[in-house]
Amino acid sequence: MRRKSDAPKLDPRREPIPTIEAFAAACGVEFRPEWGRDLDTEIASIEVAPDAPDVLRRLRAAGFRLALASNLAPAYVPAVQRLLGDLVDVTCFSCDPDIRALKPEAKFFEALQTRLGLPASRILMVGDSLGSDIRGAAAAGMSTLHLAPSTAVPAPGRIRSLSEVPVLLREAEGHEWMRRRAARANVDAALHILNRVVPDVPPDEEDE
């Protein structure tokens, strides 16, 4: 749209401007009523993935802290909070006045750590965007799972459904428990346990 030459270039996902009318004004363009109608229609169409509520409840019951982390314009926030707000412990939205940063920017993931009260090494990022979610979180030092429902071939670090997350976390906890148990035992027992339980540990030369 035509805009004033001196008007700022703004990203609605980064700016805490609450309405589309105010955002148009801030961009120096004349607001059109159909934009508001289109936005209302889009917001009304937002749906939660069918398996998400059950997965979030199960994870919460297991003691995990949950965050909803999204590049989101202010107009979408009320609808998203209404749908998922009761199922997570904290939210981390790019348009928050205290954040104003987009995934994959480092500042966004720093804010996520602060809001969860956890270091990056203890956070698992599950997302459907390789660039914003997965690479951004990995660069921040977080573990990641790429949600790719249409993928044909399973691969490490990739899931087809959110329902896989609790299963993978239980397996990871089991591996960690076995590591700790092995560390308290003698060297031979430790090697035996680690080699058979944790696939990324090289096999003992004698086993070969």
Image (cartoon, rainbow, N blue to C red):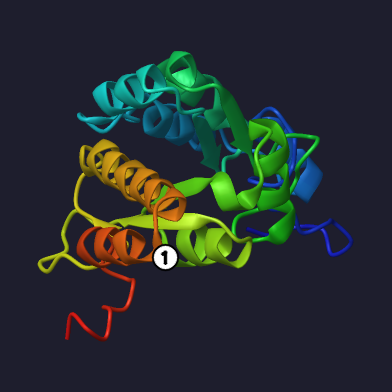
Residue receiving disc 1: 130
Residue at figure coordinates x 47%, y 47% from the top left:
124
Does 72 sit above or below residue 77?
A: below
Residue at figure coordinates x 23%, y 40% from the top left:
167
Query: Residue pushed farthest left?
Result: 152
Q: Looking at the picture, how far across and down is residue 73, in whole percent?
A: 60, 39
| Number of marks in the rendered image | 1
Residue at figure coordinates x 42%, y 65% from the top left:
130
In the depicted view, which residue is nearer to us: 89 or 91? 89
Q: Quadrant of residue 161?
A: top left
- Left or right, residue 29 beside residue 92: right
- Left or right, residue 38 beside residue 26: left
- Left or right, residue 53 beside residue 115: left
In the depicted view, which residue is nearer to us: 152 or 47? 152
- Left or right, residue 66 beside residue 103: left
Q: Quadrant of residue 140?
A: bottom right
Q: Looking at the picture, how far across and down is residue 150, in whole percent?
A: 16, 59
Label 1 element class: helix
In the depicted view, which residue is nearer to us: 68 or 178? 178
Query: What amino acid is found at the position of numbered circle 1 in the picture?
Result: Leu
Does 20 sit above or below residue 27?
A: above
The quadrant of the picture occupied by the N terminus is: bottom right
Badge 1: how crowded within 10 Å, few (<14), some, or many (20+)? Answer: some
In the depicted view, which residue is nearer to us: 15 or 83? 83
Residue at figure coordinates x 42%, y 29% from the top left:
43
Does 205 sit above or below residue 128?
A: below
The quadrant of the picture occupied by the C terminus is: bottom left
Q: Looking at the picture, how far across and down is residue 194, in whole percent?
A: 31, 62
Query: Residue pushed farthest right?
Result: 6
